[in-house]
Image (cartoon, coloured by chain):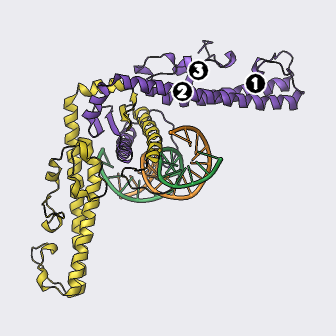
Chain colours: A purple, B yellow, C orange, D green
DNA sequence: ACAGCTATGTATAACTA
DNA sequence: TTAGTTATACATAGCTG
C-alpha cells in the first residue's frame, strides 16, 4: 500500500519500524472506528509498542469491550468453532486447487507420453516413476513443484488467519523466511485440519512428517 | 474505498450492514496481523457483531493482550496523556485555520468597503455590524458560515479520534446527522480543550453555550 | 445470507524538508 | 527526529450471479 509492495515480515530498521508503527496504528484505529460506526458493533483494540507503551481504542470504550469479553467465555468458543469452519472451507478450496493441478497434469501427461499410468483409481502423484522417460520425469517433477508451491502459498494464507484462534502452523512449513509469531506461541492442532496431502510433498528437509 | 465514497454513519439496511461488517472485520484483522508482524508489536482486537457474536484476533494471542492490559493501568494513563497532547496539537491547528480565515476575510473587507473596522486590536468577528451596508453584511455572514463549517469539520475529526480515550464531544456540536456513540458514553471534558471559539459560533439552535 | 468482480477511494512506503 | 508529499498497492462499495 505504498510506493512499493513490501513483504509482511519484521522491519529490521528501527526508525523505519517506528514510523510504520505509528502510521499503521493510526490507520488500524481509524478502520476500527469506522467499523463500529458503520455497523453499530462494539470494537476494542489494544496495541503495545515494542517499547511497552499501550495504545487502545474502544467503542463504546475499551473497558466495556474487555469486560464483555471476560464475561463471555462461551462466545469465544463460538468464535473458535466458526474459525475452524472457515479453515475447513479454505482447506476444501485447497483440495479443489490440487484437483485442478491434477487435471492439468493428466492432460499434459496424455499429450506427452500418450497417458502413462492409465485411468485406474490411482492419483497421478502415486504413479510409478520407474517407467518414465527423461522428459516425462521432468514434467512429473515440475508438476509436483507447482503443486508444492500452491500448497505453501495456501498454508501461508491460512497461517495469517489461523492466529485468530491462536492456532499455529509449524513454522518450518512456511519455509525459512522470517517467522515472527514463533517465540510466544504453542504449536498445535492445525495440522489436524490439513492432513491429506500426499506424503511426497509433506516432508521438510529433515524428512520429518508435518 | 469502494466504487463510491460513503459517509461514515450507521448503515441502515440490515443486509448491507451485515456484508460490510464481515468484509471490514476481515480487513481490520488483516491490518492488525500485518502491524504485529511488521513492527513486532503485541496487538489485540475484539469485535462484537450486533447479534452479540464475538470475533477476536491477538498476537501472540488475545488473552495475553487482555492480561497485559489489565495489569497495566498506568500505561493506560500514559496513553490518555499522550492523546490529550495530540488533541491539543490539533486544536492549535484549528486555531491556525481560523486565523487563515480571518486573514482572508480581512482582505475581502478591504477590497469591498475600504476597511470597515480599522486596524485596532479587535478580531474581525467582533466588528460592529451596525455600520455595514447590505453587501458588506452578506460578506460578513458568508465568512462566518465558512468559518463555522471549518470548525464543524475539525470537530467531527476530533470526535473520531477522541473515542480513543473515551472522551466525547457533546453530540449536538456535530450537527444532527446520525450520531452513533451517544447512547453508551458519558459526555465530559473535551470541551475544555476547545473553548476559545467566538461566542457567535458556539451556540446551537437552543442558544445553549457549548 | 454468500461468493465473486471491478471501479474507485484510502492507506501507506518511500521520499523530501 | 518528526512532519508533509506522492505514487502505488490495497481495501472495499456497489454490483452480479
Say which quarter of the image contains residue A101: top right
Rendered view: A114 above or below B4: above
Chain letter of mark 1 equals A
What secondary structure is found at the residue carrying circle 1?
helix
Q: Chain of mark 3?
A: A
| N-terminal-most mark, 2 or 3 | 2
Q: Is residue B203 left or right of residue A12?
A: left
The quarter of the displayed image where residue A63 is located = top left
Residue at 27% across / 64% down in the picture? B150
Residue tagged 3:
A194
> Which dot marks residue A87?
2
Q: Residues within 10 Å of mark 3 (few under 14, many from 20)?
A: some
- Whether the residues at callouts 2 and 3 have beta carbons within 8 Å, the answer is no
Above or below residue B138? Residue B47 is above
Instruction: Check disc 1 and report the residue beneath it.
Output: A141
Sequence-earlier tag: 2 or 1: 2
Rounded to the nearest angstrom, the CA distance separating label 2 from label 3 is: 9 Å
Near-viewer residue (B149 or B92): B149
Question: Camera-side residue: B202 or B179?
Answer: B179
Q: Could you say which is closer to the camera, residue B183 or residue A49?
A: B183
Query: In the image, is residue A210 above or below residue B94?
Result: above
Q: Position of residue A113 (x, y in %)?
A: 89, 27
Q: Residue at x 52, y 26 (%)?
A: A85
How many neighbours does mark 2 have within 10 angstroms: few (below 14), some (14-19), or many (20 or more)? Answer: some
3D distance between C-alphas at marks 1 and 3: 23 Å
Amino acid at each position: 500500500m505504498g510506493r512499493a509492495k513490501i513483504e509482511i515480515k519484521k522491519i529490521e530498521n528501527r526508525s523505519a519500524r517506528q514510523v510504520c508503527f505509528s502510521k499503521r496504528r493510526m490507520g488500524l484505529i481509524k478502520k476500527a472506528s469506522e467499523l463500529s460506526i458503520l455497523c453499530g458493533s462494539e470494537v476494542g483494540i489494544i496495541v503495545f509498542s515494542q517499547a511497552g507503551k499501550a495504545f487502545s481504542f474502544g467503542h463504546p470504550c475499551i473497558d466495556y469491550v474487555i469486560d464483555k469479553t471476560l464475561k463471555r467465555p462461551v462466545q469465544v468458543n463460538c468464535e473458535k468453532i466458526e474459525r475452524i469452519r472457515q479453515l475447513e472451507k479454505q482447506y476444501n478450496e485447497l483440495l479443489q486447487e490440487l484437483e485442478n493441478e491434477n487435471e492439468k497434469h493428466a492432460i499434459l501427461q496424455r499429450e506427452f507420453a500418450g497417458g502413462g499410468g492409465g485411468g485406474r483409481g490411482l492419483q497421478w502423484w502415486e504413479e510409478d516413476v520407474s517407467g518414465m522417460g527423461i522428459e516425462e520425469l521432468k514434467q512429473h517433477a515440475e508438476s509436483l513443484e507447482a503443486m508444492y508451491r500452491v500448497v505453501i502459498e495456501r498454508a501461508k494464507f491460512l497461517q495469517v488467519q489461523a492466529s485468530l484462534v491462536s492456532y499455529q502452523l509449524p513454522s518450518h512449513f512456511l519455509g525459512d523466511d522470517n517467522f515472527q509469531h514463533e517465540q510466544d506461541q504453542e504449536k498445535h492442532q492445525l495440522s489436524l485440519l490439513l492432513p491429506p496431502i500426499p506424503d511426497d510433498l509433506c516432508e521438510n528437509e529433515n524428512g520429518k512428517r508435518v
